[in-house]
Amino acid sequence: MKRQKLKMLATNKYTGVNKDDPIRFYNLPFIGSMYRKRIERCLYELSGGERILEIGFGSGVTFLNLNEMYKEIYGVDLTANIELITETFKELKIQTFLKNGNVLNLPYQDGYFDSVLLISILEHLKTESLIPAFREIYRVLKPNGQIVYGVPVDKKIMNYAFRLLGSNIKEHHFSDQKQIVAAAKMLFKEVAISNMCVWPFGKLYEIGHFIKREVA
């Protein structure tokens, strides 16, 4: 796929956003650029197709781009205000199929999606929940369907940066990138593992791209 720039609404146009949604960071100097680039790196790995499921879609910041790549956009999120977000994108003539729900119990039939996308979601799971989560994702993917995820690299400097922004990451992040990729490899075939690097900090964000391998 062609590398693409994240297409965004004006920040105040996003609705149904809870206090923890990172949309509030997107216009900040430096930090905002990193937030946008991590999404762009994940979008680059997507192949396009009939249906995509985004787990933890939040404010729907990916939807403008996904609408150009897939015929149908599905989303599941623990806390998002489904009605408000659906209406926001309906006004833009973008139909979405959104639900409140959990990655450990996805409300979809087997083999339904071409792609599953998770951006900064898996690090919030406890380590013992990673395999069950990947099993659910495996279940709802079509044969040879893809999973693309992005997770922050566990680094002291970034933990410190978020403390300056008033957020203690360690209270929210329970799994690191090494644990996540190890769990993914238990069920999926690796396509690519790449990193977003920012000078002078080095690797700050890891993107995993896997496909559903068939059981012999």
Image (cartoon, helix red, strand yellow):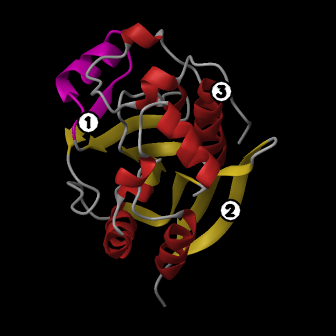
N-terminal label among 3 and 1: 3
Q: Is residue 18 above or below residue 89?
A: below
Mark 3 against mark 2, which lies toward the viewer? 3
Contact (Cβ within 8 Å) of mark 3 with mark 2: no
Question: Which amino acid does the dot numbered 1 rest on?
Answer: Leu
Real-space Cα separation, disc 3 to disc 2, in angstroms:
21 Å
Q: Which disc number belongs to residue 98?
A: 1
**Residue at the (51%, 33%) spot, across then down:** 164
Count the numbered circles shown.
Answer: 3
Q: Identify residue for label 2.
A: 193
Q: Which x, y percent locates residue 70?
A: 49, 37
Between 79 and 137, the one lying in front of the other is 79
Mark before the other along the chain sequence, 2 or 1: 1
Q: Is residue 47 visible?
A: no
Examine the image and state in which quarter residue 88 appears: top left
Left or right position of 118 against 205:
left
Please indicate, yes or no, whether residue 214 appears anywhere in the rendered image.
Answer: yes
Q: Which residues are magenta?
A: 79-98
Specify the label residue 33 is tagged with: 3
Check residue 4 for magenta coloring: no
Magenta stretch encompasses residue 82:
yes
Q: Position of residue 214 (x, y in %)?
A: 49, 79
